C-alpha cells in the first residue's frame, strides 16, 4: 500500500509540476543539470533511461529532478530531509562516513545508494524511476558547495547577507538570488550553459569512491571561497560566484551522465545481476 501511494505521489507530481515560487535555484539548477546530463548519455544508456522514464523530454526531466525537493517536507517523505546535504567539520579536508554520515543518511551515501537502485535489473519500474529522480537531484546537491558545509551555521542558512539591496541568507544567495539576478530562469540558464564546452569524461567509468572526492571538493570550496568578505555582496564576489556556480552546474551534469552511463551499461548491469545471483544462490549440500 505504501509503495502504491508513493507511486501515485510521484506520478501526480510529474503531471502537475511545481509552483514557480518553490525552490527557485533548485528548480532552475537541478532542471538544467538533468537536461545537460541526458544530452551527454551514450546511446545504450539513453535508450535504457527512456525505457525507465517513458519519455525524456525537458518537462519530464525538470519535474523528476526537482521531485525530491517538492516532497521533502511532507509527512510521507520527511525521512529524506538529511539526504540533501552532508556536514564536515571546519578545517577538515577529508570525508569520513564514520564521522560525517554514520547512519548513511546524507547526500554522499544517498548518491551511491540510488545509483545502485537505478542499475538493479530486478528493481521495479517505479523504484528505478524514483532512483533517477533522487540521483539527478542529489548529484546537483553535492555540487552546491553549501550542501557540504558546516553544521554550526546550517550550510550558510544562518549567515545574513545583502545582495543588490535585498536581505537574504548566504544559502539563499546561492540557491536562488544569484541565478535569478543573472539569468532569470532555467530556460535562460540552460541556453547559456549550452554555449560552453562540456567535458563528457569519455572513457571513464564511475565508481562510488568518486562521490567521496566530490564531497571533499565542495567542502574545500566552502572552506576557501564561498563565504564573502563582507555581509554586503560586492561586485567582485558576485562575479567570482557566478563563474563558480556555472562551473559547478556543468560539472554536476557531466558527472551525473558519467554515473548513468556506467550503471546503465550492459557490462555493469550484467555484473550487478551476477552479484545478485551469487547472493541468492542456494548453497550445495557439501557447502552447508
Image (tube, rainbow, N blue to C red):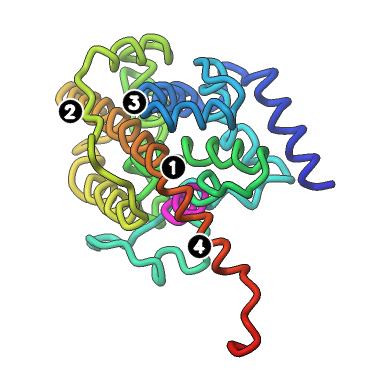
| First reached walking from the N terminus: tag 1 or tag 2 | 2
Q: Which residue extends farthest left?
A: 236
| First reached walking from the N terminus: tag 2 or tag 3 | 3
How far apart marks 3 and 4 lie (CA) works out to: 28 Å
Within 10 Å of disc 1 (Cα), the crowding (few <14, some 14-19, many 20+) is some
Task: Select label 2 or label 3 by which is in front.
Answer: 3
Q: Is the C-beta separation of discs 1 and 2 under 8 Å?
A: no
Residue 181 is a magenta residue: no
Residue stretch in magenta: 107-115
Q: Position of residue 215 (x, y in %)?
A: 32, 51
Q: Position of residue 153 (x, y in %)?
A: 39, 51
Classify mark 1: helix, strand or loop.
helix
Residue 114 is a magenta residue: yes
Among the 4 quarters of the image, the one containing residue 208? bottom left
Disc marking residue 240: 2
Disc marking residue 119: none
Disc 1: which residue: 266
Disc 4: which residue: 275
Q: Is residue 74 above or below residue 197?
A: below
Left or right: residue 232 versus residue 174 is: left
Amino acid at each position: 500500500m505504501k509503495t502504491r501511494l508513493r507511486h501515485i505521489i510521484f506520478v501526480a507530481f510529474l503531471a502537475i509540476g511545481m509552483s514557480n515560487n518553490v525552490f527557485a535555484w533548485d528548480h532552475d539548477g537541478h532542471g538544467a543539470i538533468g537536461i545537460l546530463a541526458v544530452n551527454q548519455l551514450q546511446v545504450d544508456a539513453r535508450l535504457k533511461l527512456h525505457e525507465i522514464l517513458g519519455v525524456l523530454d525537458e518537462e519530464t526531466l525538470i519535474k523528476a529532478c526537482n521531485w525530491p525537493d517538492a516532497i521533502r517536507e511532507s509527512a510521507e517523505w520527511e525521512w529524506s530531509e538529511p539526504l540533501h546535504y552532508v556536514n564536515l567539520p571546519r578545517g577538515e579536508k577529508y570525508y569520513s562516513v564514520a564521522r560525517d554520515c554514520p547512519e548513511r543518511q546524507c547526500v554522499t551515501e544517498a548518491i551511491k545508494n540510488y545509483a545502485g537502485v537505478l542499475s538493479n535489473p530486478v528493481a521495479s519500474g517505479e523504484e528505478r524511476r524514483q532512483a533517477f529522480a533522487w540521483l539527478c537531484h542529489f548529484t546537483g546537491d553535492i555540487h552546491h558547495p553549501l550542501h557540504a558545509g558546516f553544521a554550526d551555521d546550517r550550510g550558510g542558512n544562518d549567515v545574513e547577507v545583502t545582495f543588490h539591496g535585498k536581505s537574504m541568507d548566504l544559502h539563499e544567495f546561492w540557491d536562488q538570488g544569484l541565478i535569478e539576478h543573472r539569468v532569470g530562469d532555467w530556460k535562460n540558464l540552460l541556453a547559456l550553459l549550452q554555449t560552453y564546452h562540456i567535458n563528457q569524461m569519455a572513457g571513464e567509468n564511475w565508481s562510488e569512491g568518486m562521490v567521496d572526492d566530490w564531497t571533499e571538493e565542495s567542502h574545500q570550496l566552502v572552506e576557501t571561497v564561498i563565504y564573502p568578505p563582507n555581509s554586503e555582496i560586492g561586485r567582485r564576489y558576485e562575479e567570482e560566484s557566478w563563474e563558480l556556480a556555472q562551473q559547478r552546474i556543468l560539472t554536476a551534469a557531466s558527472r551525473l551522465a558519467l554515473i548513468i552511463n556506467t550503471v546503465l551499461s550492459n557490462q555493469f548491469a550484467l555484473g550487478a545481476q551476477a552479484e545478485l545471483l551469487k547472493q541468492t544462490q542456494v548453497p550445495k549440500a557439501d557447502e552447508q
